Amino acid sequence: MAGGPTTPELVAAVTAAGGFGFLAGGYLSADALQERIAKTAELTGEPFGVNLFVPGGAGEADLSGHVERWRAEAERYGVEPGEPDWDDDAYAAKLEVVLEREVPVVSFTFGAPSREDVERLHANGSKVAVTVTSPAEADQAVAVGADALVVQGFEAGAHRGLFADEPGAEGGGAQYGALSLLRLVSARTDLPLVATGGLVHGADIAAVLTAGAVAAQLGTAFLRADEAGTQPAHRQALADGGRPTAFTRAFSGRPARSLVNRAVADFSATAPSAYPQVNNLTKPIRAAAGKAGDPEVMSLYAGQTYELAGSGPAASIVERLQAEAREAATRLSRLR
């Protein structure tokens, strides 16, 4: 939900409706994150969390061909491609922000934080959650002292939380469904597990809770919420439905699930494993496509079940999910 869809208004609305909202810290500067945390705190007096991206190595992938392919798209919109440079997403500075603001729950994606960072957060009163996509990653997160694991199935929209992207592997690595991974991870740790990946219905929430999760994390379910910052063309593509989803490195250099559009179809096969260089390259082009209302060159990130997600105020979405979960639980209680 980084890059626009998550807003302080959405976090506050979900929290007010009984959920636990998370503010996406990815792609923001430290100052921007500080401002969004402050704004969210103004809108809700309840606790909320912040998610940070763990930086990886620069890598040595050849980007030249991908740069030229995207340059042709840039010319179509009259903009210049971004510089395909590596950066660490201002990780250290944003870690200082969440420490200063005493954020109660800090979650990490794309890797496990260092044990030292976890210890600093613990000393500051924060709980630490780490997104994992395999049992091996779960072991690494446990080893650094995580308090909870966010178990992400391959059904999830946007980026997989992979600790390392394997260039030759479809989806960047082993693919586990949310329920399968939840059961595998629960067999090797007693830490609280939060399940995520393609959960858009209350019955999905009931299913993962029944399977041992303490909570469900939803993203795609809120992409069309009134308070979300999802771009209009992205919203319309979600509402229209009909597009399949697929993993692609075309937009960012990391495997991410997107609705299939022209860019996904044309660029995925040759897109290098080079994050965030590719993301920095394509960012101004994707932004221009968004302004032009052209969904064919936008990163239309969404989970596999996006067509079942609704729209409207976030509070009404939460209320519907709760009602559906209760109905599913009632059905389960009738089993003999």
Image: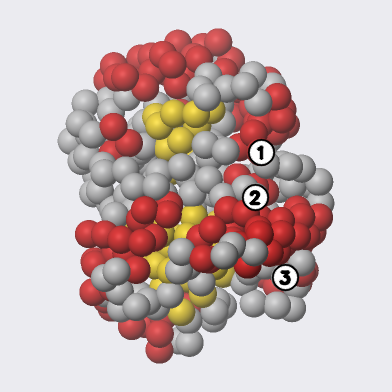
Residue at position x 64%, y 77% from top?
Answer: 47
Residue at position x 64%, y 64% from top?
Answer: 334
As rendered, which of 266 and 92 lies closer to the eye? 266
Amino acid type at circle 2 is: His
Residues at marks 3 and 2, CA–CA distance in whole angstroms: 16 Å
* Whether residue 14 is situated above or below residue 201 in the rendered picture: below
Amino acid type at circle 3 is: Gly
As rendered, which of 210 and 233 lies closer to the eye? 210
As rendered, which of 168 and 245 lies closer to the eye? 245
Tell me if residue 310 can be seen. yes
- State the residue position of label 2: 201
The label shown at residue 18 is 3
Horizontally, is 172 left or right of 229 in the view?
left
Residue at position x 29%, y 55% from top?
Answer: 134
Secondary element type, mark 2: loop
Secondary element type, mark 1: helix
As rendered, which of 265 and 57 lies closer to the eye? 265
- State the residue position of label 1: 308
Q: Earlier in the sequence, mark 2 or mark 1?
A: 2
Q: Quadrant of residue 7?
A: bottom right
* Whether residue 324 is situated above or below residue 112 in the rendered picture: above
